[in-house]
Image (tube, rainbow, N blue to C red):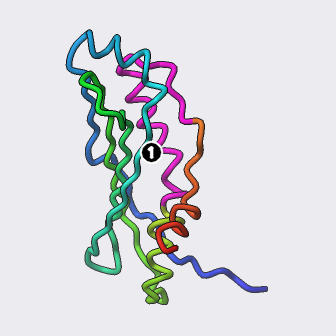
Amino acid sequence: MTTMIEKYKIVGQYIKDLSSETPDIETYLFVRDIISNYKLGIDITSKALKNKMIEVCTTLKYEDKEASEKRSYFEINYATIVKINEEMVDKKKLEKILLCDVQKDIYPRLEKALLNLIHDCGFQDVQFSKKVDFEELYKGKFN
């Protein structure tokens, strides 16, 4: 019987920053009609901490990519503290863990928090139809 060595462990996760802006009622009414055109953007950064730990910050932005004058803005910055197993030294493997595996673990919670924010800001009908494929994003980054 072979046992799979756990490559990493999430030792903590929290919302670092949560932000929303709809400056006035005219903007709200305008955005309400076009919010289906908004796009979800993802940015992932990481920095090494002590004791084989890494802070991974995943930022989701839901925004209008058009240059509309009236726009709402929604962003969540989510921090995950990851402890890497001793055996893990390969930089490529580490990168895949941070950009794919950890993201798949935290994404449902992260997406729910962002959707709650958007819904609480008066845009109850917003849903993210497309699930984010982190494997695909990762492969795309290197091809």
Is 38 inside the magenta-drawn segment? Answer: no
The three-letter amino acid code for the residue at tag 1 is Leu
Location of residue 98 in the rendering, given as x and y in whole percent from the top left corner: 44, 69
Q: Is residue 94 above or below residue 27?
A: below
> Which residue bears the numbered disc 1?
110
Is 107 inside the magenta-drawn segment? Answer: yes
Viewer-nearest residue: 97 or 125: 125
Location of residue 46 in the rendering, given as x and y in whole percent from the top left corner: 32, 67
| Furthest residue in direction right, as rendered | 1
| Furthest residue in direction front, as rendered | 67
The answer to whether 8 appears left or right of 21 in the picture is: right
Q: Is residue 52 above or below residue 10?
A: below
Q: Residue at x 21, y 14 (%)?
A: 24
The answer to whether 92 appears left or right of 80 in the picture is: right
Location of residue 82 in the rendering, given as x and y in whole percent from the top left corner: 40, 68
Question: So how many labels did they put on this image?
Answer: 1
The answer to whether 51 appears left or right of 137 in the picture is: left
Query: Which quadrant does the N terminus fall into?
Result: bottom right
Viewer-nearest residue: 104 or 63: 63
| Furthest residue in direction left, as rendered | 23
Q: Residue at x 43, y 21 (%)?
A: 34
Location of residue 20 in the rendering, given as x and y in whole percent from the top left corner: 28, 30
Q: What segment is highlighted magenta in the picture?
A: 103-128
